């Protein structure tokens, strides 16, 4: 499952004026943070370009995985009964995007930064 076309187009538009070398360097920096033991699976994106690169590199896979899991789950229940959803976060917001595309809910509660 691909990201919705409007999101793909916006990411392409925003990234158009950034060189591929700069995008690659930022991606490698983000990857290094993930691979280091010091990140504990959490990263801090300190610039708009880092957020963009993270969205370009991680958002499609996260969206697709969440979308497919949600499709499978919704096949097991009556989705018309779902009016509120609690989102524990997916990093890029792709969970909220998938929920918005698949369900007609009144409210999505976002629990950003939620910890056990």
Image (tube, rainbow, N blue to C red):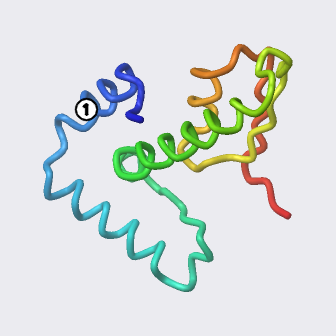
Residue at left offset 33%, top offset 29%: 8
Q: How many marks?
A: 1
Q: Which residue is mark 1?
A: 12
Residue 94's image quarter? top right
Q: Position of residue 82 (x, y in %)?
A: 83, 22
- Taking depth in this image into account, of 60 and 55 the one nearest to the observer is 60
Residue at left offset 55%, top offset 40%: 68
- Binning the other alpha carbons within 10 Å of mark 1 as few (below 14), some (14 to 19) or many (20 upward) gives few
Q: Position of residue 80 (x, y in %)?
A: 79, 15
Q: Position of residue 110 (x, y in %)?
A: 75, 37
Which corner quadrant holds the N terminus? top left
Residue at left offset 46%, top offset 74%: 33
Left or right of residue 71: residue 81: right
- In the displayed structure, 90 sits above or below 25; it is above
Residue at the outermost bottom position = 37
Q: Position of residue 25 (x, y in %)?
A: 24, 64
Residue at left offset 48%, top offset 83%: 36
Which corner quadrant holds the C terminus? bottom right
Task: Classify mark 1: helix, strand or loop.
Answer: helix
- In the displayed structure, 1 sits above or below 59; it is above
Residue 6's image quarter? top left
- Taking depth in this image into account, of 105 and 89 the one nearest to the observer is 105
- Taking depth in this image into account, of 101 and 80 the one nearest to the observer is 80
């Amino acid at each position: 499952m691909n990201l919705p076309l409007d999101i793909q187009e916006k990411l392409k538009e925003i990234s158009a004026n950034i060189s591929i070398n700069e995008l690659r360097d930022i991606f490698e920096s983000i990857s290094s943070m993930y691979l280091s033991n010091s990140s504990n699976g959490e990263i801090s994106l300190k610039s708009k370009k880092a957020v963009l690169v993270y969205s370009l590199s991680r958002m499609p896979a996260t969206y697709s995985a969440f979308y497919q899991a949600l499709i499978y789950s919704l096949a097991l229940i009556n989705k018309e009964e779902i009016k509120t959803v609690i989102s524990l976060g997916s990093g890029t917001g792709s969970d909220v995007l998938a929920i918005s595309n698949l369900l007609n809910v009144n409210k999505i509660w976002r629990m950003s930064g939620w910890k056990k």
